Amino acid sequence: DGGITQSPKYLFRKEGQNVTLSCEQNLNHDAMYWYRQDPGQGLRLIYYSQIVNDFQKGDIAEGYSVSREKKESFPLTVTSAQKNPTAFYLCASSTLGPTEAFFGQGTRLTVV
Amino acid sequence: AQKITQTQPGMFVQEKEAVTLDCTYDTSDQSYGLFWYKQPSSGEMIFLIYQGSYDEQNATEGRYSLNFQKARKSANLVISASQLGDSAMYFCAMREQGGSEKLVFGKGTKLTVNP
């Protein structure tokens, strides 16, 4: 089955620890995206990538880092520099051009 | 810079009636795409409809249609014959094409369908 997989679904971490969220797609999509969603809010773009080994900052990149070493994978690291990391994180992928983005099921991160 | 504005935090509609969810956008690009997604309480993002900036006709997908007014930079979603299952958050999004491919979303509208 083709799709985009985020893991884990729920993640708990202690304050001050870095944590990495996984995003894998087998759709052969070039573009991948990471979003943060707070309760009752819209999706805010953290990072995006159009091609392997290249990525761009979105609107709220501070405190986050990404890598794109393989076309299929776009992991997001939430660093200790992120002041309020508790949120719902969504990963998406798409082909370039006039097509929709497909989303993973999301990771709910809680920092205690 | 790209920007999406959804001015209706919440909307209510009676079952079987039609409802329009507003979306305006701002971009300096000539080539872009506009999208609508539905997010039920489960959190998944469901793609509903797409409109390209060069498309002359409004997009339609079943009960969903997109009222695209390019000069006004608006891309409103019309849901006809509302159903209880339509209750969800609805997000408008835009992606500049042929360049950055940056995909940005509005803050969303929470739609409640009443029986």
Image (spheres, coloured by chain):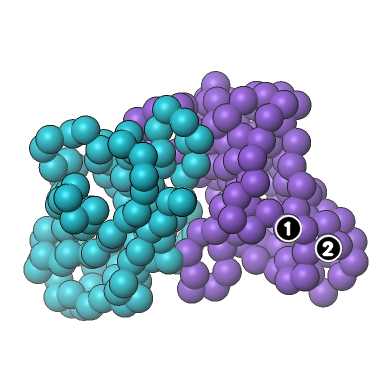
Chain colours: A purple, B cyan
> Looking at the rendered structure, which numbered label has been put on residue A62?
1
Judging by the rendered image, the residue that carries numbered circle 2 is A81
Q: Which of B96/A105 is in front?
A: B96
Q: Which of A90/B94 is in front?
A: B94
Q: Residue furthest front?
A: B28
Q: Residue at x 23, y 64 (%)?
A: B21
Residue A40, horizontal then vertical, whole percent? 48, 73
Q: Secondary structure at mark 1?
A: loop
Tell me, yes or no, whether dots 2 and 1 are on the same chain. Answer: yes
Q: Residue at x 35, y 76 (%)?
A: B9
Seen in the image, is B98 located left or right of residue B34?
A: right
Q: Are marks 2 and 1 in contact (CB under 8 Å)?
A: yes
Seen in the image, is B25 located left or right of residue B64?
A: right
> Looking at the rendered structure, which numbered label has been put on residue B105?
none
Residue B66, horizontal then vertical, whole percent? 18, 49
Q: Which of A50/A18 is in front?
A: A50
Residue type highlighted by circle 2: Ala
Q: Residues within 10 Å of mark 2 (few under 14, many from 20)?
A: few
Residue type highlighted by circle 1: Glu
Q: Residue at x 19, y 47 (%)?
A: B70
Seen in the image, is B47 located left or right of residue B65?
A: right
Q: Is residue A4 visible?
A: no
Q: Residue at x 32, y 34 (%)?
A: B31
Q: Chain of mark 2?
A: A
